[in-house]
């Protein structure tokens, strides 16, 4: 299961290439399928005729029933709600589960969130990839022209570019009056700024076939500059794209900025990310932008994000805020949290029902009975 059709289709292509010689049937579930096609896929999964299902949130539909679900793989798991992930896992009995994310979290947070999972960390760039340079410009006279010239330099080398905006179209909300938006800027860039190049537009309200057509043209370099919203945040892999400009960068969170920046630097070319920020920024926004300029290390970014936002309610479903720890500090207390985790596992191994510790059992059930199964969902 993947959060976007673009990413799910890339997984589909990979899975098909792996199982081509094995005679396995793969079905692809997404929104917009015809009723007849959906029913055919549902029957194939229920009977076991189809061994693999690749899809988006469409996999969560009540009619999706597996004969014997043995493995669940959830990509970009942070894009799904806790209960959504639980719903997919619940379609099997004791299925093995692999959750993946390119947005790392600090080790202390991993101990809590992934306490009963085996964690594998890929902390190196793939062979041949180079680090991405990040430049922060404040939107005043001359800075926008510098950003655009950076784009031109890369396109002259045969490379391609993304220009990312926080909104699809103009909003009547006065809080957004200073923001630039994708639909207007696509026309302006194509007409007035980059008239010598082909500019494309991609956003979440476009029909699936329209998005697919734009992406195919970008992948084939028939489009040199792709104007987009955060719809490209996950699953877009174009090795020839080497430059990104993020407009109103102060409006994005650290995780989003880190994910967006990861759309470039996917080939062998030097890459650069330009963050353009307006002057109406909060103190937290200033911190986020400075961190992005200073490092490309996802783990350092994750620790900074933890400090700025708070890690959330780990045993529940909140995604941000303050934890329910009375004493521990997640950045400071890695050693004691690790020791506490080891002690807890040892205690449960020796006394799975906590029969020798009735007061402890009562306290755990009192505090956490409604969410005690959620950590395993990750």
Image: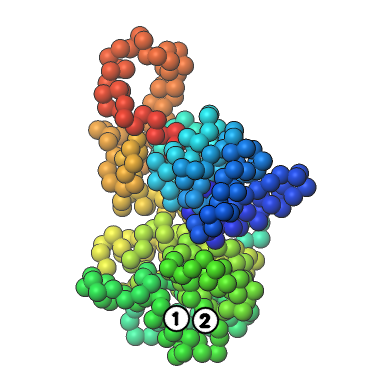
Q: Label 1's element?
A: helix
* Residue at (27% x, 68% y) in the render: 281
Q: Position of residue 136 (x, y in %)?
A: 40, 71
Q: Is residue 85 visible?
A: no
Q: To which residue does mark 1 refer?
A: 186
From the viewer's perspective, tell me whether residue 153 is left or right of residue 298: right
Tell which residue pokes out farthest to the right in this image: 21
- Name above or below for residue 61 compared with residue 251: above
- In the rendered view of the protein, which quadrant contains the C terminus? top left
Q: Report which quarter residue 371 is drawn in.
A: top left
Name the colour scheme: rainbow
Q: Position of residue 256 (x, y in %)?
A: 41, 59
* Residue at (23% x, 71% y) in the render: 173
Q: Position of residue 164 (x, y in %)?
A: 44, 71
- Name above or below for residue 51 compared with residue 366: below
Q: Is residue 17 visible?
A: yes
Q: Which mark is residue 140?
A: none
CB atoms at circles 1 and 2 under 8 Å apart?
yes
Q: Label 2's element?
A: strand
Question: For this rendering, which residue is in front, 375 or 42?
Answer: 42
* Sequence-earlier tag: 1 or 2: 1
* Residue at (49% x, 57% y) in the render: 31
For label 2, count other residues whose C-alpha is less than 10 Å away and answer few (under 14), some (14-19) or many (20+): many
Q: Report which quarter residue 172 is drawn in.
A: bottom left
From the viewer's perspective, tell me whether residue 34 is left or right of residue 249: right
Tell which residue pokes out farthest to the top in this image: 356
Tell which residue pokes out farthest to the front in this image: 36
Question: For this rendering, which residue is in front, 32 or 174?
Answer: 32
The CA distance from mark 1 to mark 2 is 7 Å
Counting labels gives 2
Q: To which residue does mark 2 refer?
A: 199
* Residue at (33% x, 82% y) in the render: 140
């Amino acid at each position: 299961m993947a959060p976007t059709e673009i990413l799910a289709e890339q997984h589909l292509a990979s899975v098909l290439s792996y199982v081509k010689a094995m005679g396995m049937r793969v079905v692809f579930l997404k929104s917009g399928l015809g009723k007849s096609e959906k029913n055919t896929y549902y029957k194939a999964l229920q009977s076991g005729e189809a061994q693999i299902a690749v899809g988006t949130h469409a996999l969560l539909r009540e009619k999706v029933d597996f004969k014997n679900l043995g493995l669940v793989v959830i990509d970009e798991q942070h894009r799904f709600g806790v209960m959504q992930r639980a719903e997919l896992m619940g379609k099997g009995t004791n299925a093995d589960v692999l959750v993946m994310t390119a947005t790392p979290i600090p080790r202390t947070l991993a101990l809590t969130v992934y306490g009963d999972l085996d964690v594998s960390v890929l902390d190196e760039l793939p062979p041949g990839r180079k680090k991405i340079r990040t430049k922060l410009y404040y939107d005043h006279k001359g800075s926008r022209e510098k950003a655009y010239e950076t784009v031109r330099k890369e396109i002259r080398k045969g490379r391609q570019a993304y220009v990312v905006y926080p909104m699809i179209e103009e909003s009547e909300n006065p809080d957004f009056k200073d923001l630039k938006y994708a639909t207007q800027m696509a026309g302006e860039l194509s007409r007035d700024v980059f008239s010598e190049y082909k500019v494309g537009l991609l956003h979440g309200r476009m029909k699936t076939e329209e998005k697919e057509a734009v992406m195919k043209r970008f992948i084939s370099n028939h489009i040199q500059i792709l104007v987009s919203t955060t719809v490209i945040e996950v699953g877009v892999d174009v090795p020839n794209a080497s430059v990104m400009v993020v407009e109103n960068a102060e409006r994005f969170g650290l995780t989003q900025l880190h994910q967006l920046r990861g759309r470039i630097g996917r080939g062998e070319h030097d890459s650069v990310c330009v963050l353009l920020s307006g002057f109406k920024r909060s103190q937290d926004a200033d911190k986020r932008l400075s961190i992005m300029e200073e490092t490309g290390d996802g783990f350092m970014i994750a620790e900074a994000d933890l400090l700025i936002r708070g890690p959330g309610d780990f045993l529940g479903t909140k995604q941000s805020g303050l934890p329910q720890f009375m004493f521990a500090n997640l950045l400071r207390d890695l050693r004691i949290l690790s020791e506490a985790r080891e002690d807890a596992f040892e205690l449960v191994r020796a006394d799975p029902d906590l029969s020798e510790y009735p007061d402890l059992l009562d306290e755990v059930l009192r505090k956490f009975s409604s969410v005690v199964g959620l950590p395993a969902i990750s």
